[in-house]
Image: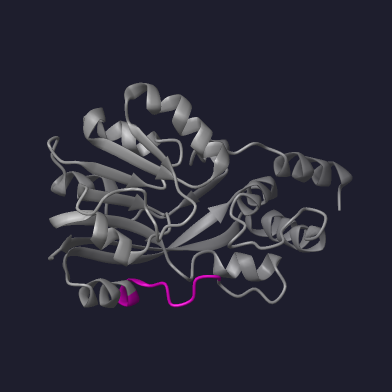
Amino acid sequence: MNSKLKEEWLQEEQEIFQGWDFSHLNGRWDSEELPWDYRTVVNEYRNPDQKLLDMGTGGGEFLLSLKHPYENTAVTESWAPNIQLCKERLEPLEITVSAVENISRLPFADDSFDIVINRHAAYDADEIKRVLKPHGMFITEQVGEKNNILLSQRLIENYRPKYLNFTLKAELERFEEKRFVIRYRDEAFLQSRFYDIGAVVYYAKIIPWEFPGFSVEHCYEKLCALQKDLEQFGFVESSEHRFILAAQNIK
C-alpha cells in the first residue's frame, strides 16, 4: 500500500477533536437523514421559564443554539477537554457547568429541573427521575447497540458491542417501570458512507467504545483492505442505529 496514504492516515490519527464537532469530516462522510429532528422534539416540550439541564453537553454547541435563558440552564460534561471548553465558553454566560464522573450521582438537588435533555450521553434512569420535578420531561437521542457494527467488525478483531441490548424497546421498558409516561419515541437504522479512509481513521480514534484498541499501526492491514473497497466502489459503507424518546416523570 502507498506509504503516502499511511502517512496521511497517521496525520488524521493526530487531529484534535473537541466539543462534539464533526466538521473535520464535512464532505468526507454522510448518512441518511433521521426520521425525526431532535431540536424540534426538544422545543415541543421546552419553554423559557423552565429549569433545563443538558447532560453531556460537549462544548455546548447544541445547547447555545436553543437560546434558552442562561440563568435557567445547567450542563454536565465528563470529558476533560470539553469540561475546560465549557468553563471557558459557558460559565461567563452564567450557565452552571458541572464536571461529572459518575452519572449515578449528579450534583443537583432532588426536583431541580423541569426538563433534562441528553444527546448521545450516558445516563442513569434513577438519577434522571430524582433530579426531575414532578411531570418534568426527559428527552434523549441515543446511539443504539448496532451502531457502526459492520465497520467495527472489519477493523477490530472479535469485536462485540460494549452496550448490549441498548435499544428503544429496552429503554421504554426501563422508563415505564420507573413510572415515566412515554410521550414520544422512534428508532432508525441508517446507511452511512465514508469517502476516504482518513475520515474512517479520524472517526474511529474519537469513538474508542466502538473501535476499542484502534490505531493506524495496529489496524493497518484492515485499513488497506478498506482502501481497496474504496477504490472499487467509491466509498466504505457503515451503518447507524439511533433512537429517541421523550418521557414524562410521574412521581
Q: At x 16% / y 44%, what residue is drawn?
A: 46
Q: Is 75 displayed left or right of 193 in the figure?
A: left
Q: Quadrant of residue 236?
A: bottom right
Number of numbered discs: 0
Closer to the camera in the image, 68 or 214: 68
Q: Is residue 250 above or below residue 62?
A: below
Q: Is 62 displayed left or right of 238 in the figure?
A: left
Q: Is residue 138 above or below residue 91?
A: below
Q: Position of residue 108 (x, y in %)?
A: 31, 48
In the image, residue 188 lies in the stretch drawn in magenta: no
Q: Residue furthest top?
A: 92
- From where the camera sits, is residue 246 visible? yes
In the image, residue 167 lies in the stretch drawn in magenta: yes
Q: Is residue 193 above or below residue 5?
A: below
Question: Which image quarter is the C terminus in?
Answer: bottom left
Q: Is 18 displayed left or right of 44 in the figure?
A: right
Q: Which residues are magenta?
A: 162-170
Q: Position of residue 215 (x, y in %)?
A: 75, 55
Q: Residue furthest front?
A: 109
The chief SS type of the magenta part is loop
Q: Is 171 displayed left or right of 31 in the figure?
A: left
Colour mapping: one colour
